[in-house]
Image (cartoon, rainbow, N blue to C red):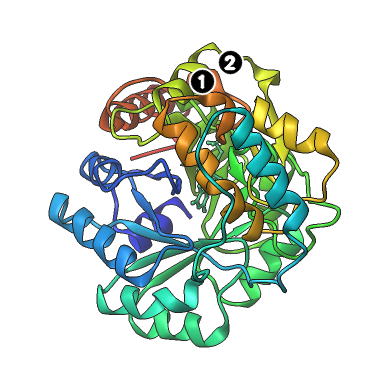
Amino acid sequence: MTHEFLRLAGVRYPIVQAPMLGVTTPEMVAAVAEAGGLGSLPVGGLSPEKTEELIRQTRKLTSKPFAVNLFAHRIPEMPELQAMREFLDDLAGDLGLAVSAELPARHYTYSDQIEVLVREQIRFVSFTFGVPDDEALNRLRENGAVLNGTATSLKEALYLDEKDVQVITVQGIEAGGHRGSFLEEEPLPQVGLMALLPTVADRIQRPVLAAGAISSGKSACAAMLLGAAGVQVGTLFVGSHESRAIAAWKEQLQRAVDTDTVLTRAFSGRWARGLRNEMQETIEASGIPIPDYPFQNSLSTALRQEAQRRDDGRFTNLWAGQNPFRAPMEPAAAIIRQLVEEMKSLELKNKVFIE
Ligand SMILES: Cc1cc2nc3c(=O)[nH]c(=O)nc-3n(C[C@H](O)[C@H](O)[C@H](O)COP(=O)(O)O)c2cc1C
């Protein structure tokens, strides 16, 4: 299955740099692509214009293939927002920040972006938070794109398999950032990678990528022993030179310990894993119902952006997986090289993992 994945993705190594909206830059994607991995450009929820601009910027930096990543959720009815809006405005006021909690003129979805991906001839399209509708999937397929969905349970993986999605990323509960769960959000699937990966790999005859706290050649090889065709690595790249994460975020990762991450809906209205901080704790302690994604995400954006501008890690999301302290402050290409070298040295003993 590793060979099948490498063929489908057109890359040398079975290592995917996870798409990380707000962190991944075209420079990161290009550096990973040039180093032989699969770089992933996140465009979830962006306008068609911004999507096109980022794809073109990446293409200027590399002629190698890369993935483009969409959010495939549906937008729910607008919930009651006033209490949360007032709470966030008061919080910003207490901090002396001149920002207010607003919704954007519109929320974009994948259906606004499909034509851009088709026009730009994107050959590898990954998605999370659900599955695009059949019309969108067919449009991408007819254009020659390989499809890669995200599953957080066996049921979701079987659903993707049924939809003929060629590559399935299984996201363990260890993973940093948003949960990709889409069939059963309540209760949220909380399966660890160690359990989920072999369960899915045994049932599905397709390349399966493993995501969640993979932070060394050893853990990557362990995932491949459990049936993964390749690995998808996020947090390890958050500290990289090409990352847009603020300095406070990168530094906090270095000091973090294994118990510092928590799952929260406080920032966006969707479950996500990040370093525990003041904004998350304050919102949760308020007891105010947190509006569903994307509404809470939009309401909290102005405050988070202002905190980022001030390099203040207390009032913005600090997404990280359960191995946060392993994220090195190095070029992305060096991170890929290190993973490859570690995997190769393990291969000397086992002769199975990587070519
Ligand atoms: C900062 C950050 C942002 C993320 N954004 C996205 C995203 O835009 N799209 C996506 O499919 N996954 C996203 N993820 C989840 C990753 O695809 C992946 O599941 C996760 O990073 C794996 O766990 P790890 O961070 O422990 O390596 C994000 C993860 C992080 C850490």
Q: Nearer the viewer, residue 300 or 98?
A: 98
Report helix, strand or loop for mark 2.
loop
User: Does ligand 1 reach within 8 Å of label 1's beta carbon?
Assistant: no
Residue at x-position 58% and y-position 28%: 95
- Amino acid at circle 1: Leu
Label 1 with label 2: CB-CB less than 8 Å: yes
Q: Position of residue 280 (x, y in %)?
A: 69, 34
Disc 1 crowd, CA 10 A, few/some/many (<14, 14-19, 20+): many
> What residue does disc 2 label?
256
The answer to whether 220 is drawn above or below residue 25 in the figure is: above
Residue 108 visible? The answer is yes
Asked where in the image residue 180 lies, by quadrant, the reply is bottom right
**Left or right of residue 271: residue 315:** left
Relative to the observer, which residue lies in front, 156 or 183? 183
**Residue at x 45%, y 27% (from the top left corner):** 217
Write the residue at 74% across / 37% down. 283
Q: Which mark is residue 253?
A: 1
